[in-house]
Amino acid sequence: MKISYDNTEQSNMTVQNIDLAWLAGIIDGEGCFCIFTNGNRSERAINPSISANLTITNSNSLLLNRCREILDALEIKYIYQDPKNGHQRGRRVMRVKIQNYSSLQRLIELMLPYFVGKAEQAKLVLEFANLAGQRGKLNYDARTEMMNKNKLLNQHGHLIA
């Protein structure tokens, strides 16, 4: 698995509103805002940890490279995963993952006006990242409540009456 942990190549790109809108559209369609429990089962039973991230998963390397160009230009920290054997429905998929809370905050704040389908998830993850970044501001019960709300949003999206 090839993973890039930092944005070592400096970008000469100037990010414009159209780039933010494009990336928001990609995230709306191919992204996932997640609040989740991490660690193995025995660790969770003793001391569960709840975190948040944004992932963009796709089989088109051109699309993900464009996402990376924009993130690099914005100086957003991300992890790029290109698994040799990671297949989804018979196709190789790559993933961009943003898990650093300050990067999540900055990206969501810049892109919030452009989100459509994942606007509520983005707001929830932004709130989580803001509170989790302040020591003692987000206890386990509050994290669990936000995680459950995120699961419902991701499972159902917006229900239309």
Image: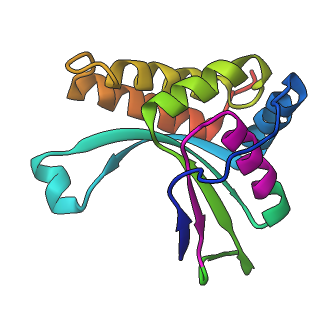
Q: 100 or 85: nearer the eye? A: 100
What span is colored magenta in the figure? 64-83
Q: 20 or 155: nearer the eye? A: 20
Left or right, 46 with reference to 80:
left
At which x and y percent is residue 93?
A: 69, 69
At which x and y percent is residue 48?
A: 20, 45
- Please tell me which residue is depicted at 57% across the width and 24% down the height of the picture: 106
Q: 44 or 152: nearer the eye? A: 44
Left or right, 120 with reference to 137:
right
At which x and y percent is residue 147?
A: 40, 34
Q: Is residue 69 magenta?
A: yes
At which x and y percent is residue 116?
A: 78, 26
- Please tell me which residue is depicted at 84% across the width and 29% down the height of the picture: 21
Q: Is residue 16 magenta?
A: no
The image shows residue 63, relative to residue 85, as above or below, that is above
- Please tell me which residue is depicted at 81% across the width and 30% down the height of the picture: 15
- Please tell me which residue is depicted at 22% across the width and 29% down the height of the picture: 140
Left or right, 145 with reference to 83:
left
